[in-house]
Amino acid sequence: MSIAIHHGNCLALLDDVPPESVDAIITDPPYGQTSLEWDRWVDGWPEVMARVLKPTGSIWVFGTLRMFMDRRDEFSGWKFAQDIVWEKHNGSSFHSDRFRRVHEQAAQFYRGEWGSVWKGKVVTMDAERRTVTRKKGRPAHMGIIEGATYTSEDGGPRIMRSVIYARSQHGRTIHPTQKPEAIVEPLILNACPPGGVVLDPFAGSGTTGAVAARLGRRAILIEGRNDYVSALRARFSGDLLLAGGTT
Ligand SMILES: C[S@@+](CC[C@H](N)C(=O)[O-])C[C@H]1O[C@@H](n2cnc3c(N)ncnc32)[C@H](O)[C@@H]1O
């Protein structure tokens, strides 16, 4: 599987990506909520990304509720599909007068018709044995609910829960906000077909690329900082093909 690594500002570099060539965008942008030097919201990036996404594509964006509320106008051209909660094993205590935060979120958006968006079924193998008959229906805020009777087996597949526990990355990480692969994997399985192309315009240490390659997807990674680009090149040297990258 190929991974293309591009160094520079994603807003400018996206001109090199052909229109409607990307199956899914999975990204963890700067939230603009810390004093880290690179953590500055990039104005207009959600709209710029839309050009390269296939009509069947969607975008998963990591963030916090505060970020999505502060930046809601930036997503006005997008339709909200769903969100997941990443439950971490530890958290941050920025404020002694608020709850200890042990979660972040990721939200999925799309442009055209929900029925045309590619959707991979993501399951966990923890079903309990039971038979369920589901009536046909269509709640206004959801898609079509198919009527069916199905029997699940103990330890069989069950649609993955939207609250996903994954240990935060600590210690020997490349990046200070490096995401665990376990939280990126369900998003790629959900949004990008096998063999398809995933774009991460804020690649950091390249978690999206690593998971994409392992799952048989191609990846385009864009990162603005020299040091992280060097780390990306080191991480993906060896058996992975570096194709189409610029420096
Ligand atoms: C939250 S981090 C991504 C971390 C990544 N998910 C990981 O697991 O390592 C966001 C990254 O976006 C990069 N960045 C910020 N502005 C950028 C821009 N305009 N173009 C490209 N990269 C940018 C930062 O340098 C930072 O590494």
Image (cartoon, rainbow, N blue to C red):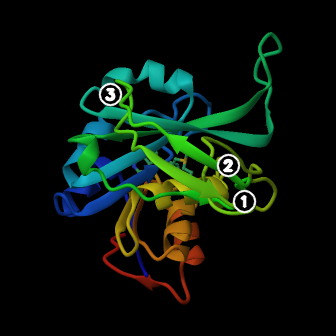
Residue drawn where x is 30% and y is 32% of the image: 79
Where residue 157 appears, x then y in whole percent? Answer: 63, 61
Image quadrant occupied by the N terminus: bottom left
Reading the chain from its start, which is encountered first: label 1 or label 3?
Answer: 3
Whether label 1 touches label 3, CB < 8 Å = no
Circle 2 is placed at which residue position?
176
Residue occupied by mark 1 = 173
Residue at 64%, 57% (x, y): give it: 152
Label 1: few (<14), some or many (≥20) within 10 Å? few
Q: CA distance from mark 1 to mark 3?
A: 31 Å
- On residue 74, which mark appears? 3
Residue 66, how many percent across, how many down? Answer: 54, 21
Q: Is residue 93 left or right of residue 77?
A: right
Q: Quadrant of the C terminus?
A: bottom left
First in sequence, mark 3 or 2: give its number.
3
Task: Return the mark for residue 85.
Answer: none
